[in-house]
Amino acid sequence: MKTNNKILSLLLISLLTFGILGCKTSNALKGGAIGGAAGGVLGGLLSKNNTATGVIVGAAIGGSAGAIIGREMDKQAEELERELKQAEVERVGEGIKVTFDSGLLFDVNKSSLNTMAKTNLDSLAKTLNKYPETEIVIDGHTDDTGAEKYNMKLSLERANTVQDYLQNKGVNNSRIVTRGFGESLPKSDNMTDAGRSENRRVEIGIVANEKMQEEAKKAEGGSIQP
C-alpha cells in the first residue's frame, strides 16, 4: 500500500510539474523566443516591446539630443535605401526599421540563406559597419501555416542565421539581439496569399547605443552654452 501511495505521489508531482512547465512554455512562445543575452540600450527594452518599432520608440531619449541622433539616423537610412532595393527602410523615431520579405532571404520552410539574401545582407552589413555606434534587434516572423511551435522555432532560426551572416561580414556580435515571434505578430490577414506573404518577414530595428546617446547629450549641453 505504501509503495502504491509513493507511485501515486510521484505521478501527481509529475503531472503538476508538467502543467506548470507547460504553462510557462506556452507563455514564452506567445511572447517570442529570444536568442542570446541583451545588454546596453536593448537590454531593458526587449521584454517590454513586442515589435521592432516598439523597441525603437522605447529607446528614444527625446529633446535636442534625440534630434541629433535623428539626423545621424537620417544619413544611415538614406544609405540603406540606396543599397537595399528590395527591402523596406523606414525612419522610426530616433531609429531605423528595415523589413525584408522572408522570401528574399529564405526558401520555403528553410532557415539557410539563398543567393539573393547574401547580396542584400552584404549591403546591410556594409552600412552597419560604417555606423558602429548602434545596436540591432533582428526579429523573425512567419505566417500561420503549420504548427505554432514549428513556426516559432523557424522564425528564431532565421533571425539567428541573419545574425551569423552579419557577424561573418564584420558586424560585432555584441551589437545584435535576435528574436523569433513565429505567427504571433501578423501584419496582415492570414486568410489570403497576399496577407500570408506580408507576414513572412524579417524585421531589423536599429537604435543608438549608449555611447552615441551620451555623445548626443553632451552635444545637446554644448548647444545651449552662450
Image (tube, rainbow, N blue to C red):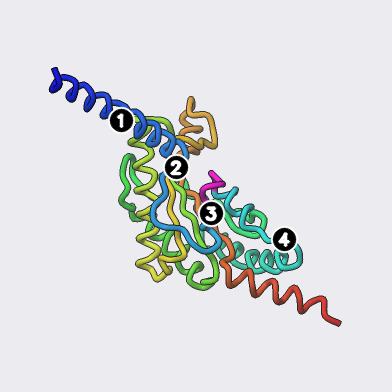
Residue underneath mark 4: 62
Question: Is residue 175 among what the camera can see?
Answer: yes
Whole-Å distance between the Cαs marked 1 and 4? Answer: 46 Å
Specify the quadrant that holds the C terminus. bottom right
Instruction: Kindly identify which numbered label has been placed on residue 183.
Output: none
Residue underneath mark 3: 98
Question: Is residue 102 among what the camera can see?
Answer: no
* Mark earlier in primary sequence (2, 4): 2
* Mark earlier in primary sequence (3, 4): 4
Name the element at disc 2.
loop
Whole-Å distance between the Cαs marked 2 and 4? Answer: 28 Å
The residue closer to the viewer here, 35 or 164, is 35
Whole-Å distance between the Cαs marked 3 and 4? Answer: 22 Å
- Residue 218 is one of the magenta-drawn residues: no
Residue range corresponding to the magenta coloring: 46-51
Can you tell which of label 3 and label 2 is closer to the viewer? 2
- Residue 73 relative to residue 187: left or right: right
Name the element at disc 4.
loop
The amino acid type, in three-letter code, at marker 3 is Val
| Residue at the spot 21% in from the left edge and 21% down from the top edge | 8
